[in-house]
Every structure is written in structure tokens, then in C-alpha cells.
Image (cartoon, rainbow, N blue to C red):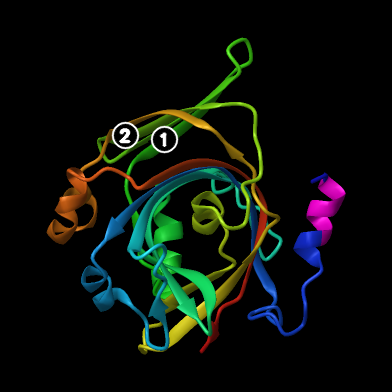
Amino acid sequence: MNSIAEDKETLDLKPDEPGSHKKVFLTAEWKHLINLTYAVDPEILKPHLPAGLELDIWQGSAHVSLVAFDFLKTKVLGLSIPTYRNFPEVNLRFYVRWKNKPAVVFIREFVPKRAISLAANVLYNEPYKRIPMTSSVTADTGAGAIRVNHQFGGQSLAVEATAEKYIPEPNTAEHHFKEHDLGFGVDHGGRTLCYRVEHPVWYVFPLKRVHMNVDFSGLYGEKWSFLNQAAPAYSLLAEGSQIKVRFPFSV
């Protein structure tokens, strides 16, 4: 898919698509997205499920994903704020459906910027928290490999992938767990909020190795400690792209 086609796919929205009527409040690039997805008991997710949504059951299981990526060239309402343009994020999310449309809900999102965490909590009740974080991406052209590394709160996540990217078929797990244009949360009044994220379909890089030193209970609470002994059901590294996030709306 060339860049012209990708831009057209992002911009040509049907007027009846959820959230397409709202103005864009954030633009950025989301790059090199590590996604490690675990099958879980649906009961552990139900307390986090906003009203009006149902769990997205994929091949008989509910799932959560640990996702790490870089936020780059960030602008809010078209404005670029010095020292807040580029930063990493790590989040734990799960998968839902609203009116049979696939979407995500976040358990917790970590960023290294206190102002971002505070604004997200105050304005939209988004579950952001600030912790020390760094990230790096290294391309080894001789070996045809890409290495992505995240350090956060004394923990680490790193992957190595082959540099030959491709777009997964629509019926694959790789496509299913990376392509969601709707996110949901709950505002301070308990109402379900939806926001639209626009981007072209992402390429992925074939993974060769995953290195983890992550304590899920320390990051997300004791009830998630079982993930410390679990193996991901699916793992991927998505290339990412430019994105647009529109103002949320109540559903």
C-alpha cells in the first residue's frame, strides 16, 4: 500500500462511522508497536467493562494485550509542545464490541510525562499513570533485523524482528489484535465514552525473539499476577503510522 493510498484510507471516512463527526484533538505517529496478547478468563475483565459493551471473544477466549510503542511528533489541537512531542507508552488493554464493532478498553496506560497523565485523568478519566520510561529502536541493515527495547519502572520488554514487513490477512490474529479504530472508557460521571482513532492498516515485522522482565502484579495489581507465568497466545511488532484521535463522545 503506497503512502497516497494510506492517506486516502485515513481521510475518506463515511459520515456514519462512529466518531467521524467529532473534531480531531490529537495527531501523532505511533511507531513500532509491540503487542503481546494473552488468553484470559472473561470473569477477570467484566469489572472493567463499560456499560453498553460486550467482550470480544476471539477463537473461544477473551484476551488482554501488553502493548508498548513510541508516541512521536505529537500535537494537541495542532500545537506542538516542547518536550512533549516524543515519548514512549506502555499499556494493558482488552478487547470489546459495541454494536458488533471491534474496540479496545484500557486497564492502565503508562507514560513518562506527568502533565500527560494528569490531563488524561482530569479531562477524560483515562487510566494514565506516570512512571520513568525510556525506549529505543535499532535497525541492523546487515542482518536485516529491527530491535525495539522499552524500560519502564525497573522492568523491560524487548523484541527482535525481521525487517521484511507485510500486511497480515484480515482473518488472522495479527490483524485482529492490531486494527481497532474505537476506544472506550468511562467519564467521571460513569458514562461510557467512545473515541475514534484513524490510521491506515499497519504492516507487521515477523518476530524472531521476545525478551521480557515484567511483573504484571506490580504494574497492574495482584489479580494480574497470573500473567507472570503465562505465555502470550499471540505476539507481533507493528510498524505503525501517523494517527488522528478525535474528541470523545458519550454512548
Q: Give the range drawn in magenta.
A: 3-8
Q: Name the residue under label 1.
A: 134
Could you tell whether 209 is left or right of 220 in the image?
right
Q: Name the residue under label 2.
A: 156
Q: How many other residues sit within 10 Å of disc 1, few (<14), some (14-19) or many (≥20)?
A: some
Residue ranking furthest to the left: 222
Helix, strand or loop at label 1? It is strand
Q: Does the magenta stretch include residue 5?
A: yes
**Residue type at numbered disc 2:** Ser
Classify 130 as above or below 180. Answer: above
- Residue shown at 22%/45% (left/top)? 230
Q: Percent x, y for residue 249?
A: 56, 84
**Residue type at numbered disc 1:** Thr
Mark found first going from the N terminus, 2 or 1:
1
Could you tell whether 30 is left or right of 15 in the image?
left
Could you tell whether 76 is left or right of 147 in the image?
right
